[in-house]
Image (cartoon, rainbow, N blue to C red):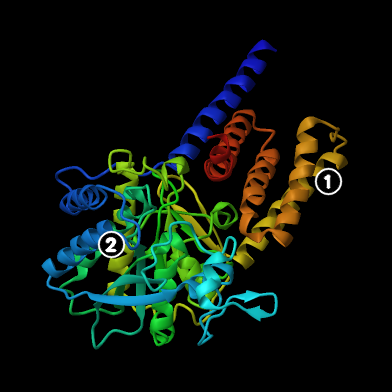
């Protein structure tokens, strides 16, 4: 009897230690490349540029952002490319209108309404909450911003992909992670393809200004380039939501199967989860593109959010492993886009269910397969319950209650929460298979441990994300 209890306790302890340990390993960024790695020079250049570019705060309209813009342009010109500086001017009325209703770019004239009466532009600045504080307006009450656009095109390329990062910071933040990390990793992506004359997809790199005061650079670009709606197949935005953690992919759409498939084929190893949309926070440049009909992907890391938008967002505080993960992801996606046409990626959007399983690995399946998986799990569990009743071995117990609850959750998630159905269906499937093996004692114990580890591998990353994104910021 004592040995039986000891075996049970040992198996539970092993399940928890291995399952939670490997589960947390899935959400840790990979170690930076060593000196012998072919990626090491690009990684070192990126770090050096981040340290240089994020030496001090550089908000839109400041003298410091002029310096950062010069750094970026110089880097691009050293690659033999010619960037385009696009100046855009916003009135205070336009900024207020954008912040109150971002889906506005079909309108030729922007007005801010006070009830049914249009406000004169000169009085718009008095609207409570419509304009951010310390808006850098000129003597005419206007804001001038400057986007930087780089094109690497080929006459034989079919379609295009737009990579976006912003180079302004909050007024008191050096902006090392948000978003010099995005900018400098993009510079290395440009460098990797600068001399590629055999592109299968046109590459566009946009560095936006005034993201931190209302995504103004992104909106200005969209309004200035209506032709891009037909030329761009996918927008990929890189913008940090924290100073560390693993790179997360935010699809914000259920029709994400082809986009996730592209990511997996590229060799990039971010964490892709159908449920990231539920815990991620909107508000990056990608919001502007999505609200105007572009198909896009967001790349972010959300751990340690308390470091962002303040004086602590420095190069010294930046997580270097996260920086490497961003660089590797950016390089892999750029390489894939350069060598593969994306022209048909939006032709037949399908709903996909995807989740991390083992470090650096993601599983992708069509929504139909997720429904079938849930149905199979429920049928096997019910079959086992019926078999137990027929053998007169069924009894009310803690495990029976858990089994019944899992069946209900699996059925419900398959209908209402397809994106997260794997969280219930796979553990239930493992439990049901384990139950059928019960007459082989050793095999039953081993299968029980493995099914428990499997469940923890699925749940630990989600619990970690919910804690980092939603709970931890409220504790700071």
The answer to whether 320 appears left or right of 284 in the picture is: left
- The residue lying toward the viewer, choosing from 38 and 424, is 38
On screen, residue 199 above or below 371? below
Find numbered disc 1 in the image and state the secondary structure of the residue it sits on. Answer: helix
Quadrant of residue 152 within the rendered picture: bottom left
x 42%, y 75%: residue: 90
Q: Measured from the top left, where is residue 197 in percent x and y?
A: 18, 79
In this rendering, the label closer to the viewer, 2 or 1: 2
Marking on residue 386: 1
The answer to whether 295 appears left or right of 143 in the picture is: right
x 63%, y 76%: residue: 113
On screen, residue 128 above or below 7? below
Marking on residue 186: 2
Quadrant of residue 472 within the rendered picture: top right
Spatial CA span between label 2 and label 1: 58 Å
Q: Measured from the top left, where is residue 326 in percent x and y?
A: 33, 53
- Mark 2 Cα within 10 Å, few/some/many (few <14, many 20+)? many
């Amino acid at each position: 009897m004592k040995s039986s209890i000891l075996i049970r306790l040992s198996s539970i302890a092993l399940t928890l230690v291995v399952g939670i340990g490997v589960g947390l390993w899935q959400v840790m960024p990979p170690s930076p490349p060593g000196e012998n790695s072919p990626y090491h020079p690009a990684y070192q250049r990126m770090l050096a540029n981040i340290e240089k570019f994020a030496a001090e705060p550089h908000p839109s309209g400041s003298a410091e952002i002029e310096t950062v813009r010069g750094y970026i342009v110089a880097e691009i010109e050293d690659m033999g490319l010619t960037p385009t500086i696009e100046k855009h001017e916003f009135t205070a009325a336009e900024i207020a209108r954008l912040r109150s209703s971002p889906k506005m770019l079909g309108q030729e004239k922007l007005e801010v309404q006070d009830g049914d009466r249009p406000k004169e532009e000169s009085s718009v600045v008095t609207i409570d909450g419509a304009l951010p504080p310390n808006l850098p307006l000129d003597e005419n009450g206007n804001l001038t911003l400057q986007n930087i656009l780089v094109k690497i095109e080929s006459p034989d390329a079919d379609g295009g992909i737009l990579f976006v990062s912003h180079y302004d910071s909050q007024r008191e933040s050096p902006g090392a992670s948000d978003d010099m990390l995005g900018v400098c990793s993009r510079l290395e992506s440009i460098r990797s393809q600068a001399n590629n004359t055999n592109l299968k997809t046109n590459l566009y790199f946009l560095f936006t200004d005034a993201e931190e005061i209302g995504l103004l650079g992104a909106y200005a670009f969209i309004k200035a380039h209506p032709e891009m709606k037909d030329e761009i197949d996918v927008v990929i935005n890189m913008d940090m939501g924290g100073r560390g953690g693993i790179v997360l992919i935010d699809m914000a759409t259920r029709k994400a199967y082809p986009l996730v498939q592209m990511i997996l084929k590229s060799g990039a190893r971010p964490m892709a989860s159908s449920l990231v949309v539920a815990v991620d926070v909107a508000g990056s440049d990608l919001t502007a593109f999505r609200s105007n009909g572009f198909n896009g992907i967001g790349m972010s890391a959300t751990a340690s959010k308390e470091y962002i938008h303040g004086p602590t967002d420095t190069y010294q505080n930046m997580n270097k492993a996260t920086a490497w993960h961003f660089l590797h992801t950016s390089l892999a996606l750029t390489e894939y886009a350069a060598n593969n046409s994306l022209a048909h990626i939006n032709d037949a959007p399908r709903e996909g269910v995807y989740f991390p399983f083992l470090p650096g690995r993601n599983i992708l399946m069509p929504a139909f397969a997720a429904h079938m998986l849930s149905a199979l799990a429920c049928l096997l569990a019910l079959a086992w319950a019926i078999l137990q009743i027929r053998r007169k071995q069924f009894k009310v117990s803690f495990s029976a209650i858990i089994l019944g609850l899992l069946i209900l959750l699996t059925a419900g998630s398959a209908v209402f929460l397809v994106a997260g159905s794997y969280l219930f269906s796979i553990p239930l499937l493992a439990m049901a298979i384990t139950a059928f093996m019960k007459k082989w004692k050793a095999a039953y114990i081993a299968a029980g441990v493995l099914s428990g580890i499997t469940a923890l591998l699925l749940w630990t990353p989600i619990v970690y994300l919910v804690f980092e994104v939603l709970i931890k910021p409220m504790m700071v």
